[in-house]
Image (tube, rainbow, N blue to C red):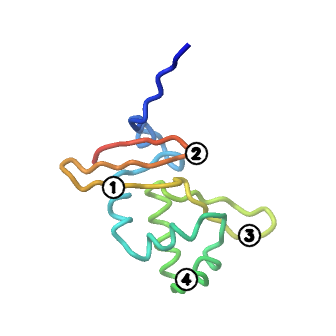
Amino acid sequence: MVSHVSHEPLPCNLKAQDRPTGCDPPAIVEVVSDDEARELFLACDEPKTAKEIATECDVPISTVYRKLDQLTKAGMLTPAEDPSTTATRYTKSMDCISITYDDPIQIECVKSGLTLSCEV
């Protein structure tokens, strides 16, 4: 039996979901245009606190909290309470994001090995 495997991205249905599992495509486009926000996103390969991210990226803690909030609202980061402390740890919700600035803007993201796409 031969099965056909498509390499085309699937239409993203996550934007229709309630946060925190869904994403906000216009907010993604806005936040990835911010150099500091991108740096903070890239620093979250493993769960980290805001203080750890601020130290690693050499960004003021007040800026880190503001950018983490934007990244979380866009659906790019997932906050989780650390049971061993009172701190919140942040980790990437998406493995990879690619934006094509055509008309309309195309977003492709990889979540848990699944490639999804949407238009803004």
Whole-angstrom CA distance, mark 4 to mark 2, is 30 Å
> In this figure, what is the number of numbered marks?
4
- Tell me the crowding category of disc 1: few under 14, some 14 to 19, or many 20 or more residues within 10 angstroms, Cα based: some
Whole-angstrom CA distance, mark 1 to mark 3, is 35 Å
Which residue appears farthest toward the top when viewing the image? Answer: 1
Q: Seen in the image, is 72 located left or right of residue 31?
A: right
Q: Residue at x 54, y 81 (%)?
A: 57
Which label number is shown at residue 61?
4
User: Mark 4 or mark 3: which comes first in sequence?
Assistant: 4
Task: Write down the quadrant of residue 74 in the picture.
Answer: bottom left
In what quadrant of the picture does the N terminus appear?
Answer: top right
Whole-angstrom CA distance, mark 4 to mark 3, is 17 Å
Q: Residue at x 55, y 44 (%)?
A: 113
- Tell me the crowding category of disc 3: few under 14, some 14 to 19, or many 20 or more residues within 10 angstroms, Cα based: few
* Secondary element at tag 3: loop
* Secondary element at tag 4: helix
* Secondary element at tag 1: strand
* Secondary element at tag 2: loop
Task: Write down the quadrant of residue 26 in the picture.
Answer: bottom left
- Tell me the crowding category of disc 4: few under 14, some 14 to 19, or many 20 or more residues within 10 angstroms, Cα based: some
User: Mark 2 or mark 1: which comes first in sequence?
Assistant: 1
Tell me whether the residue at label 4 lies in contact with that at label 3, contact meaning CB atoms closer than 8 angstroms.
Answer: no
Whole-angstrom CA distance, mark 2 to mark 3, is 28 Å
Q: Which residue is identified by label 1?
A: 99
Q: Which residue is identified by label 2?
A: 112
Closest to the camera, between mark 4 and mark 2, is 2
Q: Position of residue 112 (x, y in %)?
A: 58, 45
Whole-angstrom CA distance, mark 1 to mark 4, is 28 Å
